[in-house]
Amino acid sequence: MADVLEKITAIKRISDVFSANRTLIGEGVPEWVNRTRKPALEAFQRMGIPGFRTENYKYTDLTRLFDNENFRRFFKPEDFEINLNEVFSCDVPEFDTHLILVVNGWYDEGGNRNTVYPEGVIVKSLRKAMVENADLVEKYYGNLALSKDDPLTAMNTLFAQDGVFIYIPDNTHITKPLQLINILRSEDDLYVTQRNLIIAGKNSQAKIMFCDHTLMPQQFINNNLTEFEIGEEAVIDIYSIQNQHNKTASLSGLYIRQARGSQLVTNAITLHGGIIRNNLKVLLDGEHASAKICGLALSDKNQHVDNYTNIEHIRPNCQSDQLYKNILDDSSTGGFTGRIHVLPHAVKTAAYQRNNNVLLTNAAKMNTKPQLVIDNDDVKCSHGATVGRINDEALFYLQARGINEKEARLMLMFAFAHEVLAEIKIEKLRDVIDKLVNKRLRGEVSKCHSCAMDCIR
Amino acid sequence: MLVIKDLYAKVEGKDILKGINLTVNAGEVHAIMGPNGSGKSTLANVLAGHSNFEVTHGTITFNGKNIFDMSPDVRAKEGLFLSFQYPVEIPGVSMVNFLKTAVNEHRKYRNEKELSAGDFLKLMREKKAMVQIDSQLTNRSVNEGFSGGEKKKNEIFQMAMLEPKLAILDETDSGLDIDALRIVSNGVNMLKTPYNATILVTHYQRLLDYIVPDFVHVLYEGRIVKSAGKELAFELEEKGYDWIKKEQGE
């Protein structure tokens, strides 16, 4: 009974926070945005905080996290006075990106001033876009991430005030990667809500990186949700690098719809973080769309990393290919659930999934679960999951050539990880991440040398 | 160089080696022959330090040092090299990175400066030419997708790169066609100096047509039951191992 009681408490507390700040939360955004909050509140109260009993969250129990949470929330943007150039200078000078800065979930105007985008491209605060680009935002906001389906989506929608809005017009190619840096900094423990909306037009091309950083040692919960519409024949790469300290809970959702002939690559690299849950949903909603979906997570101490993917094959002739890998050290835990749903008319579907994991200690634990729902006969589907240790014969081979055991282990772990990194198409980014992963495996602080963001504490 | 005294070893609780005595000096080539299951590969793996093989009795000294005090990588850096019977494929570890790390670990052990990238590639080119390994192989992951012959050539190539004092070739001839056998043997012969030594583990005499041994030992049921010059190999080729078994009272 006590368990149930606690859950009611967390639901009530969060509902109360919303009620008490309702006016502030709704300020400055159009009425149609605020109208989404009521159903979100109802959905949240119905589903509650996801825990072991929530089927889709059975590997990540968030009840304890929320039971102890009484964090500060900002319902108005603060003036952080961050000079982007001081905070962030990338290690590789040639690695030139359009920088977009988000601080505690709020789009930072000061940090994003100097970038010049191709004609017609819009990059701005979602809050602003709700007013200034109401036609676009209203059409797509809340279309892909549904409060009724997921408690974290419900919580995000309930508190959503700001984040990033990106619009890429038809036939527009952005050659420089867009780099969206999420910074968490606060003197108090902080709960952050971030909501992003990205629309990529027909035949557009862009590469988008999400970099999550913590600047201060406080505890953070970051509920971060992105909806992404990909137009016909568009080519989109999405990379995310999660590098936060171990007192951070990162609860993120990425909801994508792909139109006909579009090509998507996603690659989620998790280097550090306390509790990490990544929800990824991809709707293959146009013929001949393809999605390559990858993830690599390196965890140690008591970290927890859970990737949940849900690929919906709605139209015929689409292809999805998933590759997720985890290396788990100490008593870290991990989860992977790969749901593939092929709908009745989605014939000639090719859907592949692979999840390989290495446990470095007896205390580390990995849960992996493929979930294939196939509603027609004309499909090619495969899935495979492995949980193992470092290959002893390979280890001995390297040692027998004079390489000490520690170095040999590192070489093998790096080799294991590299298969995922090889899918990163931006060569400079791949090199940077290669180095970060190598440092991470060596237990060294994995950040670029000159980057002022001291992520790991 | 290598002195093995009264060596006993177990694999998975089963006694395999039952009192091996063997001395190998610089400049010598020893062939260890014997029927399947006699303990040849066990001996090779015990020398290299594989953890599946448990030594229960006896001593091995290499360059006057107790080999049991050394981890496999230290044995390698002291100059011991095992050419594997079944070289393992290691996807994701590039040949270049692997060999560069190995060569520099050896150099660090000898208090020498690590090779620059340029010098390393130069060394690699020289040695590749020497052992006639296909240039493309070094652009791949270690042994990944290599044919049986390519794997064995790759072992000899690594041997050329590391220049060991004592090379143990475990069934290096198995699975090789005549051309590959010639290339591998040429490599071994070219690498031979008065200062290093070779142990050939094989059950065919064929390899010994190409690499001429100074001594031939017959290993049977975990012990060396016969030692002689190269003429013993011909005798074995002619008569098989049965007469040895008979001599041993079976």
Image (spheres, rainbow, N blue to C red):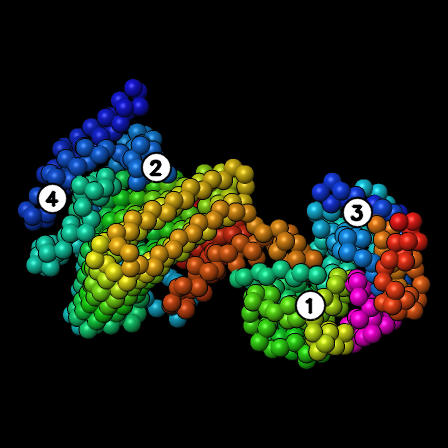
Q: Badge 4 local density, few (<14 within 10 Å), some, or many (20+)? A: some
Q: Nearer the viewer, mark 2 or mark 4?
A: 2
C-alpha distance separating marks 2 and 4: 27 Å
Residue A430: x and y in percent read 42, 64
Give the SS element for disc 2: loop
Amino acid type, callout 3: Ile
Check disc 1 and give the amino acid type: Gly
Which residue position holds label 3?
B16
Name the residue that disc number 2 marks: A58
Residue B196 on the magenta span: yes
Query: Which residue type does callout 2 highlight?
Result: Lys
Distance in Å between CA atoms under marks 2 and 3:
50 Å
Nearer to us of marks 1 and 4 is 1
Furthest-left residue in view? A31
Give the x, y percent position of residue B233. Answer: 87, 67
Left or right? Give the position of B14 relative to B223.
left
- C-alpha gap between disc 1 and disc 4: 70 Å
Q: Label 3 marks which chain's residue?
A: B
